[in-house]
Image (cartoon, rainbow, N blue to C red):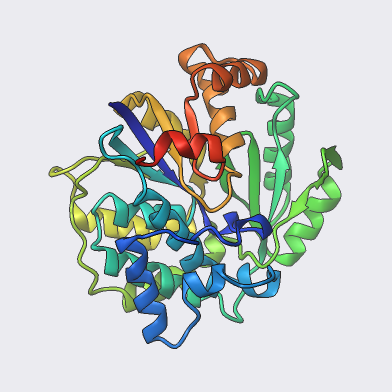
Amino acid sequence: MKRALVLCPGRGSYGRDSLGSLDGLHSPRLDVFEALRSDAGRPTPREMDAAEKFSSKFHVRGENASSLTAGVSVADLDQVDPEGFRIVGVIGNSMGWYTALGYAGALPMHDCATLIETLGQYQAGNIVGGQIVYPLVDEQWRIDPKREQMVNATIDATEDLHWSIRLGGQAVLGGTEEALAQALEKLPSLQLGSHSFPLRLPLHSAFHTPLMTDSAIRAQEELHDLSWRSPHTTMIDGHGQVWKPVHSDPTKIRKYTLSTQVTEAFDLRRCIRTALRTVAPDVIILPGPGSNLGSAVAQTLILEGWAGITSRDAFVARQNDDPVLLSMRWPDQRARVVAQ
């Protein structure tokens, strides 16, 4: 049996190639999201996933994308072979932290779904600022110190521009429209594959920045009755704080989730690094939708030099020999994870 660290993706993970992710999956956890959305008269994750065509205006909007993303994640996690893997840690990127709360037991699944649905609905007609992505790594996925310094200098020189997410080898910056416009002018253009950077993320607010203070205050008022608990599985948050079973204070988890998590930068790099050192996994399981966190995980493993992985080539060689990252959106890797 392998020790596994679970990484739940954020709401930007569901893309065009994610349609049909829920087809044929039996999932008690997903059923909770289905019932909550159905009772509210909103399209359920299964209904959205079964659409004939992908629509950015429909699938990417926060009021739909949040529960859709979390629904696919928990459905995938319900397929993990309990005899093949022992889950020793649960983490999540950005909104994935909320999914992780339910999977690790810090919230009952109904309360987890309520949290995700409530915060997702805050985005309906209320996008605050936005986010842009900028790469920080070279061709071997090693951090380029000069590029990181340039990003920090741009933030320091631009009012209302903030670190939003330290996404492995990428910087996600959040800010007002004016601040983002200035950042787009200051940061040199880069072409990596089919993507041009800086890259603006569609229909995203300036998450994890002070611009979301009003949302944090509202969430604390409207979600005061959720049943917070000490998790049954170790969690690590976006500040690298470790939340262990039995000994974690539920009120402090609540405070982090509804305040700090909303208004301060999410450091996925530190989160993964701390998890590697704390729970010592054999593998990292990445549930769907999508697989776009794979590069962030690989870049962090390289930065850490974990298991001798110090370059992109070394990571690829290890994946071909004995995978350390198992993305459930890749059929060959999924086959290693699910119960046969």
Q: Is residue 297 above or below residue 246?
A: above
Compare residues 7 and 253 and report the one nearer the observer: 7
Pinpoint residue 224: horizontal percent, then vertical percent: 26, 73
> Left of 159 or right of it: where is 18?
left
Q: Is residue 246 above or below residue 17?
A: above
What residue is rendered at 57% in x and 37% in y? 294
> Left of 181 or right of it: where is 74?
left
Q: Is residue 159 above or below residue 54?
A: above
> Left of 90 or right of it: where is 266?
right
Pinpoint residue 117: horizontal percent, then vertical percent: 42, 73
Residue furthest bottom as drawn? 41
Quarter occupied by the N terminus: top left
Compare residues 14 and 26 and report the one nearer the observer: 26
Viewer can see residue 79? yes
Pinpoint residue 232: horizontal percent, then vertical percent: 19, 46
Q: What is the quadrant of residue 255 in the picture?
A: bottom left
Q: What is the quadrant of residue 190 in the picture?
A: top right
Viewer can see residue 161? no
What residue is rendered at 81% in x and 52% in y? 184
What residue is rendered at 22% in x and 74% in y? 225
Pinpoint residue 96: horizontal percent, then vertical percent: 45, 53
Compare residues 77 and 238 and report the one nearer the observer: 77
Quarter occupied by the C terminus: top left
